[in-house]
Image (spheres, rainbow, N blue to C red):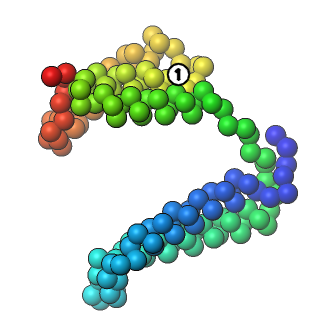
């Protein structure tokens, strides 16, 4: 990796935090803020957003002031594998049930790396799926189908 005149990682992360903060401040603009002794519905979102804005500005300033490593080009394989896994889970969780949808999601997400082996991924997916069923169905008692209808 080559060195760059700016630390683009810090700068872009700071800009991301500033954008999220601006969106939250805009979304909560009509809520009553109140004050510390009598908090309104918009008090905590506003405080958290302003804190996030401060961190964002800090990272932006740090990114501009110091040199950093150049950003590597985006690799499509991990990006597409994770997006496909999330999309497939969203589309199949209700139809196939939590158990099957989570196994399929984990197997799809494993394609993000070349190091994943199917003989390691499938047992892990089964174990994680079982844990998800126990957590969401038994412990949290969420009304999520476990198996296909």
Residue 63: x, y in percent? 73, 62
Q: Is residue 131 left or right of residue 71?
A: left
Residue 51: x, y in percent? 50, 72
The one of 86 and 11 positioned closer to us in this rendering: 86
* Residue 127 appears in the picture as rendered: no
Q: Quadrant of the C terminus?
A: top left
Residue 147: x, y in percent? 19, 22
Q: Is residue 64 left or right of residue 96?
A: right
Vertical side of 143 occupied by 65: above or below: below
Residue at position x 39%, y 15% from top?
A: 122
Q: Quadrant of residue 101?
A: top left
* Residue 120 appears in the picture as rendered: yes
Q: Quadrant of residue 38?
A: bottom left
Residue at position x 28%, y 30% from top?
A: 93
Q: Quadrant of the N terminus?
A: top right
Q: Is residue 121 left or right of residue 147?
A: right
Residue at position x 23%, y 37% from top?
A: 135
The residue that disc 1 covers is 111
């Amino acid at each position: 990796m080559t060195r760059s005149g700016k630390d683009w990682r810090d700068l872009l992360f700071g800009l991301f935090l500033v954008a999220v903060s601006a969106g939250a401040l805009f979304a909560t603009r009509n809520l009553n803020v109140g004050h510390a002794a009598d908090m309104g519905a918009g008090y905590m979102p506003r405080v958290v957003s302003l804190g996030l804005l401060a961190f964002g500005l800090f990272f932006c300033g740090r990114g501009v002031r110091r040199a950093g490593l150049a950003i590597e080009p985006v690799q499509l394989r991990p990006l597409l594998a994770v997006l496909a896994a999330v999309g497939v889970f969203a589309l199949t969780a209700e139809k196939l049930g939590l158990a099957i949808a989570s196994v399929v999601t984990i197997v799809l997400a494993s394609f993000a790396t070349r190091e994943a082996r199917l003989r390691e991924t499938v047992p892990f997916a089964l174990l994680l799926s079982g844990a998800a069923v126990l957590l969401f169905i038994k412990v949290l008692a969420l009304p999520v189908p476990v198996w296909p209808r």
